Amino acid sequence: MLHRLRRANLKRVNLLPINLLIGLLVALGGAFVNQPQPLAHEVELSNEVGGTLHIEPNDSPKAGTASLTWIALTRRGGQPIPLADCNCNLSVYAQPYSPGDRPIQQPTLSATSAEGRTGMPSASITFPRAGAYELVLQGSPTAAGAFSPFELRFAVTVAQ
């Protein structure tokens, strides 16, 4: 009788949490290998504008090396915002910093194409040393009312 109860209880076990745990462990397995792992694109939102940051190569910038940095801007609903439609400014801050501190760089933005999109704001950034940085993209529309002014802040870790 006890054997039947145990078998009946085993049939009712929900395997979803176990499968999720196994999937998570497999996904994180690479984090325990002693190799640098590329970071996923960072996404930030401000008002109805979203931005996805990408830094070459593979979102793993190296200190002292120029890195092409671009941000895919999108309005709510998925419509892209090209640089031509945005008065955008990019500032680079070394962490930690306080409000009122001057950026260490304010690179000139130009339009680039990548991953099937065109006209994205981009800049070549050379981070002076390894450590934490924050990229701040501020923008407003070139045509009044196209979208609300925005400010996107992206945390970046730079390797040696």
Image (tube, grey):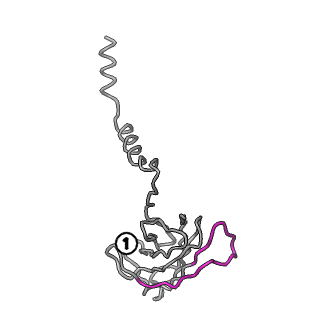
Q: Is residue 97 magenta?
A: yes
What's the magenta region? 91-111
- Quarter of the figure that contains the C terminus: bottom right
Percent x, y for residue 149?
Answer: 53, 79
Percent x, y for residue 22?
Answer: 38, 40
Question: In the image, what residue occupies the spot 29% across and 16% down?
Answer: 4
Residue 22 vs 91, above or below: the answer is: above
Give the SS element for disc 1.
loop
Residue 55 vs 31, above or below: the answer is: below
Q: Residue at label 1?
A: 78
Question: In the image, what residue occupies the spot 34% across and 30% down?
Answer: 13
- Quarter of the figure that contains the N terminus: top left
Percent x, y for residue 131?
Answer: 59, 64
Q: Main secondary structure of the magenta part?
A: loop
Amino acid carrying label 1: it is Gly
Question: In the image, what residue occupies the spot 45% across and 80% down?
Answer: 121
Percent x, y for residue 154?
Answer: 53, 68
